[in-house]
Amino acid sequence: MTGLRPIRRRLAWSALSLALLLVAVPGCSKSSPAKPTVKVLLIGDSIMKQGGAFVGDELRSMPGVDNVEVRNEGRNGTGPLTPHLFDWYAATKRYLAEQHPDIVVVLFVGNYTSTDLYRDRNGVLVEPYGSDFFRAWEYETRRIVQLAAGSGADVYLVDPPPMITAEGQRRVSLFRAINRQIAQDYTNTVIINGTKVLSDSSGNFALSLPNSDGQMVQVRTFDTVHLTEAGARILATEIARQIAPSVLVAQRRAQLRTAG
């Protein structure tokens, strides 16, 4: 990450001479150098697109967070196993090269297709949501995390929100297990429990939940998959809360670099 390098003055100006200089030189001001920007990259599907829209505002409202840039690359209908629609491995490589993020947050909830199947490393077509599917999902997600972690970024894997059907919950449980297995293998990778924050008090699917003011608000749309704005804000608040320590560490690291 690059920052603004402060100019080192070799002369010790007196307060009076500095004041005169500020008046005499057009365009000169007393403003301090711009604070280094901490960069956050969000990648994922429509749920990330929805929640990610509010992550920047949530971060900037937190104590100590000064200057943060959030790039939300959530894309509807995509996932690690839909390279014909959008190649997430290639895109992640490109985003890392363009932005050089300090933090990468990943959220995929299981998008797939029954008409244009993913081919695994052996060239075998993978049927939806069977054991081969979840092995392939882990393989492709791991490749994305390896890219992000290898860039030096802190990586956060967000668990999918709960689903209303038994089959949906089975998939969420398997995605959560995959996230945890990957996180164990990369020391700078952390889990964000997106399932819990959008569940009711019993850990089940919830159509409505209390917001920050304690008022019950609808958090899922009537397709039972996507989020309302209130639900997206709840998810964004949790993502921001979890990644805030990494943002503060990256801020401090950048400040030390620019002061050195």
Image: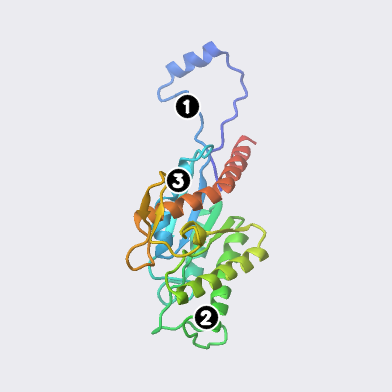
Q: Which of 33 and 41 is in front in this view?
A: 41
SS assignment at label 2: helix
Q: Mark 2 points at which residue?
A: 133
Q: Is residue 194 above or below residue 244?
A: below
- Residue at position x 46%, y 77% in the image: 167
Looking at the image, do the residues carrying marks 1 and 2 touch, with CB atoms under 8 Å apart? no
In this picture the colour scheme is: rainbow
Looking at the image, do the residues carrying marks 3 and 1 touch, with CB atoms under 8 Å apart? no
Q: Which amino acid does label 2 sit on?
A: Phe
Quadrant of the frame with the C terminus: top right
Residue 93 percent across, percent down from the top left: 52, 64
**Residue 81 placement, left or right of 145:** left
Q: Mark 1 points at which residue?
A: 31
Q: Mark 3 points at which residue?
A: 58
Q: Answer with the quarter of the image where residue 179 lies.
A: bottom right
Q: Nearer the viewer, mark 1 or mark 2?
A: 2
- Residue at position x 59%, y 55% in the image: 153
Q: Earlier in the sequence, mark 2 or mark 3?
A: 3
List the single residue furthest toward the left. Answer: 222
SS assignment at label 3: helix
Residue 155 percent across, percent down from the top left: 58, 58
Residue 193 percent across, percent down from the top left: 54, 59
Q: Which amino acid does label 1 sit on?
A: Ser
Give me the disc on residue 145. Answer: none
SS assignment at label 1: loop
- Residue at position x 54%, y 78% in the image: 134
